[in-house]
Image (spheres, rainbow, N blue to C red):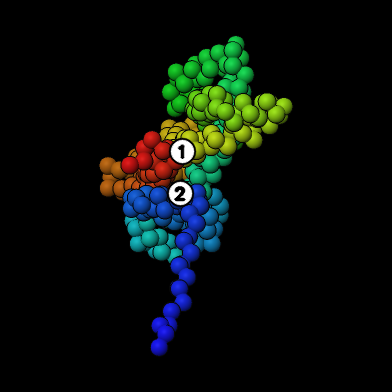
Amino acid sequence: MSDVIAPETAAPAAKVETPFRRFVSEFFESRIATVALCVLGLIILLAVLAPWITPQNPYDLAQVDVLDGRLPPGSEAFAGYTMWLGSDGSGRDLYSAILYGLRISLSVGVASGIIALAIGMAIGLLAAYAGGRTENIIMRVVDLQLSFPAALVALMLVAILGKGIDKIILALVVAQWAYYARTVRGTALVERNKEYVEAAQCLGLSRLRVVFRHILPNCLAPLIVVGTVQTAHAISLEATLSFLGVGLPQTEPSLGVLIANGFEYMLSGRYWISVFPGLALLFTVVSINLVGDQLRDVLNPRLKK
């Protein structure tokens, strides 16, 4: 009786590991970064859904009652709803005010970061690719900008321009663009001397195409890390300016304004007016920084274990 040869079983096809899958798997290796990303996602979701999940619009003075001022957490408002986090001195529901304040803080931080990134990226690429006197002039301006503290620059500009979201964004852009310019210039100098740039130049490609199609994509990794950290810095800087009274007006309470409103009541035992907005600001800034640290570890090959 002839032996029956069993058909060979086909080996399971191995999954192709794309760069994106590798990036995701390496990012979620850190439990701290995973928790920080979840917290940040929850904060953003709450800020986006604020008009639909809050009982009060703190920007609408018709909905704010002075009789509800300085109520402790869990008190019932004059309108009938429960103020789970209490109220501030103006009668705003702190739960509603914090979520609306997060909308302002996040929008100011992201908007100023994107504009500063675009300006700094263009200036940094120009300095790295042009070289010579142009690079020296640009980098001396960058060094001059970085020699002043960002808070001092933003404080002077806001004091001159006045209050308002657009004024705050402009001040933050002026205070931050130099960080992006220096980061892009340093990375672009390394990429400019590589073989693929020389090959592109030998093919007769235009300078703009060499810069934006070949050099810029290889500069995005450090830009993502710097952009994440600078967004957290912009949020804390806006809160600092608002706390000092030179940022946003009282009718548009950001987290800094809410903290400042309760500062005078801290010694009288009404801690919730400043503590709860301060915790919201703390969780936001810390979660963004932790995500940025993990992005730095993943995107920088020298830091990989």
Location of residue 78 with respect to 258 vertically, above or below: below
Please tell me whether mark 2 or mark 1 is closer to you in this view.
2
Tell me which numbered mark, 2 or 1, is placed earlier along the sequence.
2
Q: Classify mark 1: helix, strand or loop.
A: helix
At x 59%, y 33%, the residue is 216
> Which of the 4 image quadrants contains residue 206?
top right
At x 36%, y 52%, the residue is 29
Mark on residue 225? 1
Q: Position of residue 127 (x, y in %)?
A: 58, 20
Q: Distance from label 2 to label 1 (Cα)?
A: 14 Å
Q: Amino acid at mark 1?
A: Val
Left or right of 120? Residue 210 is right
Location of residue 35 with respect to 150 vertically, above or below: below
Is the residue marked by circle 1 packed among few (<14), some (14-19), or many (20+) residues within 10 Å? many
Residue 93 visible, this orientation: no
Q: Amino acid at mark 2?
A: Phe
At x 51%, y 26%, the residue is 190
At x 40%, y 88%, the residue is 1
Q: Position of residue 255 (x, y in %)?
A: 44, 44
Q: Which residue is disc 2 drawn over?
A: 23
> Which of the 4 image quadrants contains residue 120?
top right
Is the residue marked by circle 2 packed among few (<14), some (14-19), or many (20+) residues within 10 Å? some
Residue 130 visible, this orientation: yes
Query: Residue placed farthest to the bottom in the image?
Result: 1
The residue closer to the viewer here, 268 or 289, is: 289
Q: Position of residue 126 (x, y in %)?
A: 61, 23
